[in-house]
Image (cartoon, rainbow, N blue to C red):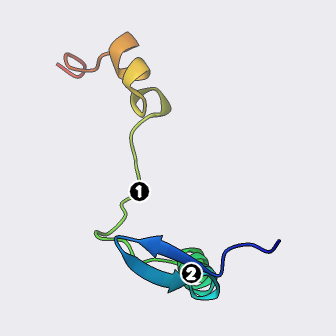
Amino acid sequence: MSGPRYLVLDGKRYLWRDVLRIRQEQRKAAKREQPTLFPIKEDCRPPTQKTARGRYEEPTLFEGT
């Protein structure tokens, strides 16, 4: 017994080979580099200030005064 030749979604029949072809195209498109939505900026904070834990343990609100 062989596998199904088609797939039924929302009452529409799709050939299984077409579903596989479309999935391959999706995987190829995902591998391509995608542009960012905004410019990426370098994080210039000290290492302890880059994480929430570091900011909590070493607050800098009153430094420099």
Q: Nearer the viewer, residue 28 or 3?
A: 3
Residue 33 point in image, percent of width and height:
53, 78
Residue 3 point in image, percent of width and height:
74, 72
Residue 39 point in image, percent of width and height:
32, 69
Q: Label 1: state its secondary structure.
A: loop
Residue 2 point in image, percent of width and height:
80, 74
Task: Report which quarter residue 62 is drawn in.
Answer: top left
The amino acid beneath tag 2 is: Val
Task: Report which quarter residue 9 is drawn in.
Answer: bottom left
Q: Is residue 51 above or below residue 43?
A: above
Of marks 2 and 1, the one in the foreground: 2
Mark 2 burial class by Cα count in 10 Å: few <14, some 14-19, many 20+: few
The structure residue drawn at horizontal position 30% and vertical position 70%, both measured from the top left corner, is: 37
Q: Label 2: state its secondary structure.
A: helix
The structure residue drawn at horizontal position 42% and vertical position 20%, both measured from the top left corner, is: 54
- In this rendering, would 45 be left or right of 8? left
